[in-house]
Image (tube, rainbow, N blue to C red):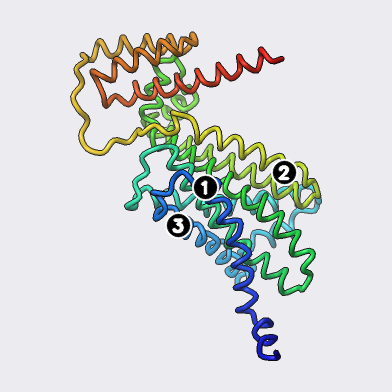
Amino acid sequence: MEFWQNIVGTDIFKYSAAALMALIPVFVWIYVWFKKNQQESKHIFFVFFLGTLTVLPILGLQLLWMYHPELDVYGYINASVTNPLIWFTVTYMLAGVLEELAKGSIIYWLDFSSIQIKTINNCIKYNLLVGLGFAFSENILYFYSGIRGGDFLNLFGVFMFRGMFTVCAHMIFSSIVGYFYGLAKFSDPIVKQEKWQGREHKLVRWYAHLKGTDPRRLLPKIKWWTGVLIAMIMHGAYNLSLISGYIWLAALIVIGGFFYVRYLSTRRAGNLVLAMTGAARPSLMAPRDEEVVLELLGMWMNEGRFDEVSGICTRLLERDPDNRVVKLFQAKAEDRKVTKNTFSKFKKRF
């Protein structure tokens, strides 16, 4: 009996128990998000493993600050900020910034690995896994502290909240970064499609002119940093809500983010394969004819004639099967049609 008590009292046992507890929400969320993607199981667990490693830069920074206090950002904030509200805001926003930068770096590595990112939906799902991996590693530390403290009633409350909301929050923030990374990666056909709808990025064009660079090169960077900024703000707001005791606000951020990401991941445009492997097949359509048709599609999209756009795109793709702009027009027309029909049904009910 004393032998087992000695084992239970070791740090190895406590860390193992914490890891087993942290695995429970991992399996639940993987089943919820990836039950229809069993053929990608090898990629799923590999990307999840990479996500677990993203806590290392954060721990490395903390270790650096411990031995070099002059570099400690939090120490500087504590010494220079006297207003409690500003202190809380800056401190917990900074935590969100550091974590999202650490998680967001993985999608760059994946894009140049053997896992070829071919769709915007891939970006969402892979970054979602990175967030899940980060939350798993973070939960081990939290659950270990609870086990070590011996307050098992409080540990159960921490397990339920972190397993349901905090894990989901990390996944949501990361997947938003993934979505905007996808927009950045596939920005060329998106810019062309928006051009024919008359939607110009004037601010981007002005800044590109100021920097003396091509707007098409600048737009991907802006898209990427837009996603990172949104994730940082949401993450910081979530942290600030928790520390301020506004649990309901933190829950609203997570629930709203969940439905937003769910919407993004189910859209036809998000699932569209925009990166083609191999050479494109030659078009049977003359360049001048293509420009006229694309201009017509842009006009019809702005007028809400989504059925006509989808029908014309189907016929165009018979002649030019690898035209990414036409594919994007068709996918967005289908998305808008579904949204329009859903809104019409909602109006009829009320």
**Which residue sits at x=22%, y=30%?**
280
> Is label 3 in a helix, a strand or a loop?
helix
Position in image of residue 99 (x %, y %) = 58, 54
Q: Nearer the viewer, mark 2 or mark 3?
A: 3
Q: Amino acid at mark 2?
A: Ala
Relative placement, left or right, of 204 versus 149 is: left
Expressed as whole percent of the image width and height from the top left, the position of residue 72 reads: 64, 63
The type of residue carrying mark 1 is: Leu
Marking on residue 45: 3
Q: Is residue 220 left or right of residue 90?
A: left
Residue 173 occupies which quadrant of the picture? Answer: top right
Disc 1: which residue? 128
Front position in the image: 17 or 143: 17
Q: Residue at x 66, y 90 (%)?
A: 3
Establish if 165 lies above or below 340: below
Which percent across, then down, holds residue 291? 30, 13
Residue assigned mark 2: 251
Q: Name the N-terminal-most of marks 2 and 1.
A: 1
What distance separates the C-alpha of mark 3 from that of mark 1?
12 Å
How far apart are the two marked residues, 2 and 1, measured between alpha carbons?
Answer: 18 Å
Instruction: State whether residue 212 appears in this view.
Output: no
Which quarter of the picture shows residue 321?
Answer: top left
Say which quadrant the C terminus sits in: top right
Q: Is residue 288 left or right of residue 84?
A: left
Residue appearing at x 70%, y 86% in the figure: 5
